[in-house]
Image (spheres, coloured by chain):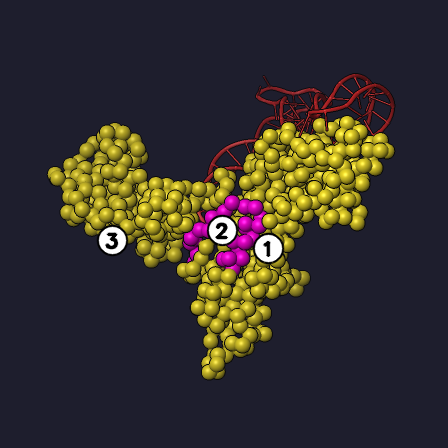
Chain colours: A yellow, B red
Amino acid sequence: MTIQRFTRALIPTVKETPAEATNASHQLLLRGGYIRQIGAGIYDFLPLGLRVLRKIENIVRTEMDRAGASEVLMPAMLPAEYFQETGRWDVYGPVLLRIKDRKGGDYHLGPTHEEIITDMVRREVKSYRQLPLNLYQIQMKFRDEPRPRGGLMRCREFVMKDAYSFDIDEAGAVKSYETMREAYRKIFTRLGLTFRIVQADSGAIGGKTSAEFQILADSGEDAIVACDNCDYAANVEAAEVAAEPAASGTAAGEIEKVHTPGKGGIVDVAAFLKADVKDFLKSLLYVTDQNELVMACLRGDHEVNEIKLANAVGAREIHLASEGDVVKATGAKVGYAGPVKFNGRIVVDPSGAAIASAITGANETDHHIKGVSFARGDYKAEVKGIRSAGAGDRCPQCDKGRFKAYKGIEGGHIFILGTHYSSKMNATYLDEKGDKKPIVMGCYGIGVSRLIASAIEQHHDKDGIRWPMPIAPYQVVVATLGNDAAMMEAGEKLARELEERGVEVLWDDRDERPGVKFKDADLIGIPLRATIGAKTLATASCELKRRDSADPKAFDLIPLAEAADRIAAEVKKAMV
RNA sequence: CGGGGCGUAGCGCAGCCUGGUAGCGCACUCGGUUCGGGACCGAGGAGUCGGAGGUUCGAAUCCUCUCGCCCCGACCA
């Protein structure tokens, strides 16, 4: 085994923070010489970056194998016919990177591989005896993201582990799903990540059973809520809201019109009228994909959940109505819409319907109305849960706890697909009776390259990265201070002894001042640093410093004779 | 795709408003002094000023177009 010397490695660290990087992981990956940008959302992996990527891949691979899955490798470049078969060629839109070959044939780069794997299975699987089956791959995926960002956080080319399960029935699929869920739990734990398994919106492709593995980080793009009492956690998009008290109280008096000049926003009006935001009935106008105009009413302090709203009105997609549409529909400027005397479909959230005496827009510019009651019948509306869950809400599962809000990075997503693809692609098997049945599928993704960034978001300080041992590019860095023959010999010897004990070691043999070596070691984030200086060498010892120790100056002085054994033991212990 | 910003040496930036022929720090090369938390002195090398067109005696600077990148929003591993 050759010892990896710093002088023979490509580890181009930089002192200054590149301007384009705004989050910690992106900055540190660039500064530490892990990655370099090639284009928007396209990166080189330098040696250190690739080492971390491989570490993560291997953990994923071993746990997938342990869970009974088999690894395959599918092409990244795909003929259009497969996506055409399921209709995704048209549905996917511009995110699909399309290319033409020399003959003008349509191809694309794979953003995910449901069709291809389904094709593989339908060719080879004929009988229930061949099922269940779980196949996975670790491969580059391509998505022409509208907006790549955050370094490895959101790329156009990224490494993903995608697995697909095939079962004879729904019960089997659920079992496969549960197995994957458990495997994922192990994977994320072994990676040293703090995460939450979260109920998610499964998107357009059906499937009620779905979970996201959210890595908690302030820089995360997803908002999630988790109960402070039980294990319930959900993406706010999907979070259920505990049942609201039934619409009770009725307004005492009559509806009264109030003049609220130039006060469009709820907060402004509330301040102006000296009223509580919770007494407001917020009214928003939406347009569905079928061009239907819908008014959504919620309690003033709540936010609409557009996914729930779309489901509530039976639309595939909805978007806020334009200013012009609002004016046309309400006869007032934006900010004065309300359900009373509104001519059209209205959906009200239970918490909005429960307001005894609400303040809401008068559908007249610069005017609101007070004393509105749903119970009394001041307006007609469908009562449906359409608001997003938020911090402080009561937990729908245990009914005792309250929600806390977190930010998360979606590291993995698992869900049951059912027969969505298998029926379209005619992937069937014969059961015991000889009946032809569609295979029931599940799919399970992990954003492998994204996990590199996620891990750094969770493990860094002002000096650099603090890798968890299992995914560190090297486990130990040996820093020799000085380059006389005796020092070089001692450094090489320690590095070699560590190698012999299976420790991954980087020997910083550069002719650099101590400060430079220390700074680089901290930046790169290698968990353990063994330093041999002139003074320690004189006493045949070295210093062992831990990157994650609370006291940055703390270290153990250990004899060189014992160093390799002690360090190897410490590495082993940290490998979980 | 909507909104905002930036492209000047490998990296970080100044110069642009008020046109006059390109500069600072880091990095790099050579020499010397240093050597336990990103050393110092001296001497160097390095730039089609993102690209194209225009205005002008003269354009990094003004105008038009274009390409790229970053950030904020609608989508996703």
First to last magenta residue range: A180-204
Kindly identify which chain the residue marked by label 2 belongs to.
Answer: A
Q: Which mark is residue A171?
A: none
Q: Measuring 22% from the left and 42% from the top, which residue is drawn there?
A: A355
Judge left or right: residue A150 versus residue B40: left
As helix, strand or loop, the secondary structure at mark 3 comes to strand
Q: Residues within 10 Å of mark 2 (few under 14, many from 20)?
A: many
Please tell me which residue lies in front, A410 or A77.
A410
Confirm whether the magenta stretch covers residue A473: no
- CA separation, marks 3 and 1? 47 Å
Q: Measuring 19% from the left and 33% from the top, which residue is drawn there?
A: A258
The residue under label 2 is A213
Name, please, the residue furthest toward the bottom. Answer: A433
- Among the two numbered marks 3 and 1 on one chain, the one whose residue lies closer to the N terminus: 1
Kindly identify which chain the residue marked by label 1 belongs to.
Answer: A
Q: Measuring 37% from the left and 41% from the top, which residue is drawn there?
A: A391
The residue under label 1 is A60
Q: Measuring 79% from the left and 37% from the top, which residue is drawn there?
A: A491
Give the tally of numbered discs: 3
Name, please, the residue furthest toward the left. Answer: A253
Q: Which mark is residue A382?
A: 3
Please tell me which residue lies in front, A574 or A355.
A574
- CA separation, marks 3 and 2? 34 Å
Q: Nearest to the eye among marks 3 and 2: give it.
A: 2
